Image (cartoon, rainbow, N blue to C red):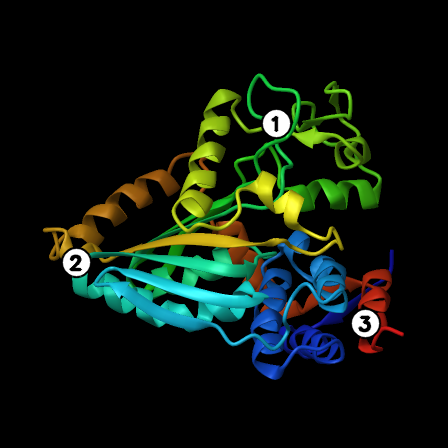
Amino acid sequence: MANQMMTVADIHQLVIDCFTANGCDIDNAAALARTISFAERDGSASHGLFRLPGYIASLRSGKVDGCAQPTVERISPSVIRVDGKRGYAPLALERGRAALIEAAKENGIAAMALINVHHFAALWVEVEPIAEAGCCAMAFTTYKPAVVPAGAKQPLFGTNPMCFGWPRGDQPPMVFDQASASMARGEVMIAARDGHDVPLGTGVDADGNPTTEPQKIIDGGALLPFGGHKGSTIAMMIELLVAGLTGMDFSFEAQKNDNNDGGPPNGGEFMLAIDPNRFGDADNWLQHSESFLERLAGMEGAHMPGNRRYANRAKSAAEGIAVSDALLASCREFLKPAD
C-alpha cells in the first residue's frame, strides 16, 4: 500500500477544507481539525482521518449543526455545564475547558457535563490539556449499543471509553484512554478494512457466538466487555455518569433516536478535574507521585501509559505522518460538496 508523508499542518488544513466544504463554520472546522490531526500525529489511526466519512455523513444528513456555538454555564461553584447546541464535541470541549480548570483550582475538584454534543473522538485529546494545566482529569462518554453485558446475549452498552490524566510537572502528563469494551470499535473496523482477524474474546457474531472475524462483529454482532463482569460493571457506571447525571441518552436510547447516517449520535460527556495542590499535600504530591511512576517505569516489561503516543508524536515531528494514498484520495472526495 503506497503512502504519502504529511505534516500535522497538512492534515489540519485538509480537514478544515473538507469540513468547510460541507457546512462547518471555521470555529467548528478548526476544532475538529485539531482533534483529527492530533490523532494522526500520535498514531491513533482509528480516531484520525479514518473518522472523516462519519463526520461528513452527519453534516450532510443535517443531524449535526456544523455552525453550532456552544454555551458555557457555571451552575454551581464546582459544576460546569456546556450545551453543544447539536454540534460536534471538540468545540464545546475547548469552550468549556478554561471554566472547568478554574473551578477545580478554586474548589479543589470540579465536574463538567457536556450535553447535546456529537462525540466521535479519542478522549486523551481532551484530557491531556487539563493535565498539562496541573490538574488530575477524568473523562467518560457513551455511544450506541455495541457491547454485550456480561452473561447477556444482546448489546446494551456503548464502547464507553474512559480516560485518566495525571500531571507530572515539567514532564508530559501520564494519560491513558481505553474503552470498557475488549477493543475499541474503530480498531475492529480497521481490522475488517485491512483483512485481519481480531483476538478471540473481542466479540460475538449475530448469533452470540464468539468470533475472530471483525466483519461478523460489525454486521449484527457485538463486542464483549474487557475482563468479563468487571468491564461490564465499569461500562454500566459510565452509562450512569454520562446519561444518568446529565439527562442525555443512554446508549440504547441513542440507538433509537439516531438516524444511523454513520456519524455519532447526539449525547453527552462527563469530565472531572482535580487540583492536587488543594488536597493537603501541596508541597510533596508531585515528588511523591513521581517516585511511584519512576518505580513503575523502571520495572522490566512494565507498560507506562502514553509513552507510545509520545514516541509517535516525536517521530511524526521528525519524519512526517504516513497516510495511505487510498485514505487520502477518499478524504479529498469530501472537498466537493454533496450533489
- Residue 301 seen in render: no
Q: Secondary structure at mark 1?
A: loop
Question: Reading the chain from its start, which is encountered first: label 1 or label 3?
Answer: 1
Q: In the rendered structure, which disc, 2 or 3, sits on the residue that comes first in sequence? A: 2
Screen quadrant of the C terminus: bottom right
Determine which residue is flagged by label 3.
Answer: 334
Residue 168, image x and y in percent?
31, 57
Query: Camera-side residue: 270 or 245?
Result: 245
Q: Left of 311 or right of it: where is 210?
A: right
Determine which residue is flagged by label 1: 148
Where, by quadrant of the figure, is residue 320 drawn?
Answer: bottom right
Are there few (<14), some (14-19), or many (20+) residues within 10 Å of tag 3? many
Please, what secondary structure does the residue beneath circle 3 have?
A: helix
The disc placed on residue 140 is none
66 left or right, relative to 213: left
**Discs 1/3, front:** 1
Q: Residue at x 11, y 51 (%)?
A: 281
In the image, is 203 to the left or to the right of 115?
A: right
Mark 2 touches mark 3? (CB < 8 Å): no
Q: Earlier in the sequence, mark 2 or mark 1?
A: 1
Q: Are marks 2 and 1 in contact (CB under 8 Å)?
A: no
Q: According to the image, label 2 marks what residue?
A: 277
